[in-house]
């Protein structure tokens, strides 16, 4: 009879432990992706360029003046770029183009989430980009300059 009580307690203990593990796995499965799925976004705005401009390209990269993504956004003068990592630095510049696909030089460069040594609103490179000047609003970043 004594052995039956010990086995009953051991069985009850194991079920309790398994329930805790099951609940922990469920929480991890459903809560963790919400945090991992969170991303930052940035909104870039600029004044329209004068002349025969029909559209703009937004250039994006993780190094200053080294852009690996180009977005053709038509003749809009603002764009929101989402799905950015909140711990990564991003550099942006805009170019204007005409009907013959002639492209202007880069606008001023904007850096989001850069350290104090990083380039922010720098005008290096090719110049003014036909009058484009980028204003930014960043959401989800630790630092936005």
Image: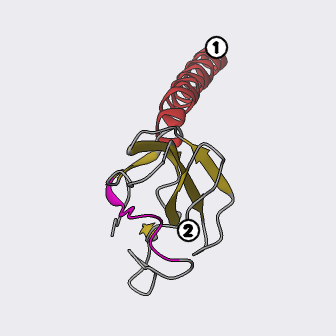
Q: Which of marks 2 and 1 is in front?
A: 2
Res. 105 mark? 2
The correct choice, above or below, for 33 with respect to 139 in the image is above
Q: In terms of depth relative to the viewer, which is nearer, 88 or 36? A: 88
Query: Counting other residues with Cα less than 10 Å from the Cα at mark 2, is it few (<14), some (14-19), or many (20 or more)?
Result: some
Under circle 2, the secondary element is loop
- How far across and how far down the image is residue 93, in percent? 50, 63
Residue 137 is left or right of residue 23, and the answer is: left
Residue 89 is at least partly visible in this image: no
- Which disc number belongs to residue 43? none
Q: Can residue 39 be seen in this view?
A: yes
| Mark 1 residue element | helix
CA gap, disc 2 to disc 1?
84 Å
Q: In this view, does 12 lie above or below 38?
A: above
Q: Earlier in the sequence, mark 2 or mark 1?
A: 1
- Quick one: quadrant of the C terminus? bottom left
Measuring from the top left, give residue 126's x and y in whole percent.
56, 77
Horizontal and vertical percent for residue 17? 56, 28
Q: In this view, does 1 lie to the left or right of 133?
A: right
Task: Verify CB contact (< 8 Å) between mark 2 and mark 1.
Answer: no
- The quadrant of the rendering that contains the N terminus is top right
| Residue that numbered label 1 is attached to | 4
Q: Main secondary structure of the magenta part?
A: loop
User: Magenta residues?
Assistant: 127-137
Residue drawn 65% across the image and 53% down it: 69
109 or 27: nearer the eye?
Answer: 109
Q: Residue furthest bottom?
A: 117
Residue 129 covered by magenta stretch: yes
- Residue 75 placed where, x, y %? 45, 39
Image-quadrant location for residue 113:
bottom left
Residue drawn at point x = 46 percent, y = 56 percent: 86
- Give the residue at x 64% y 55%: 102
């Amino acid at each position: 009879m004594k052995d039956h009580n010990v086995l009953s307690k051991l069985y009850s203990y194991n079920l309790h432990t398994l329930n805790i593990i099951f609940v922990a796995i469920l929480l991890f499965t459903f809560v963790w992706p919400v945090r991992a799925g969170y991303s930052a976004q940035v909104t870039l705005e600029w004044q329209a360029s004068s002349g025969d401009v029909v559209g703009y390209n937004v250039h994006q990269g993780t190094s200053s003046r080294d852009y690996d993504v180009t977005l053709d956004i038509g003749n809009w003068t603002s764009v929101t770029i989402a799905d950015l990592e909140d711990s990564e630095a991003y550099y942006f510049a805009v170019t204007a183009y005409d009907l013959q696909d002639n492209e202007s030089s880069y606008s001023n460069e904007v850096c989001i989430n850069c350290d104090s040594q990083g380039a922010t609103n720098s005008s290096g490179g090719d110049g003014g980009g036909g009058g484009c000047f980028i204003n930014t609003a960043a959401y989800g970043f630790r630092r936005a300059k």
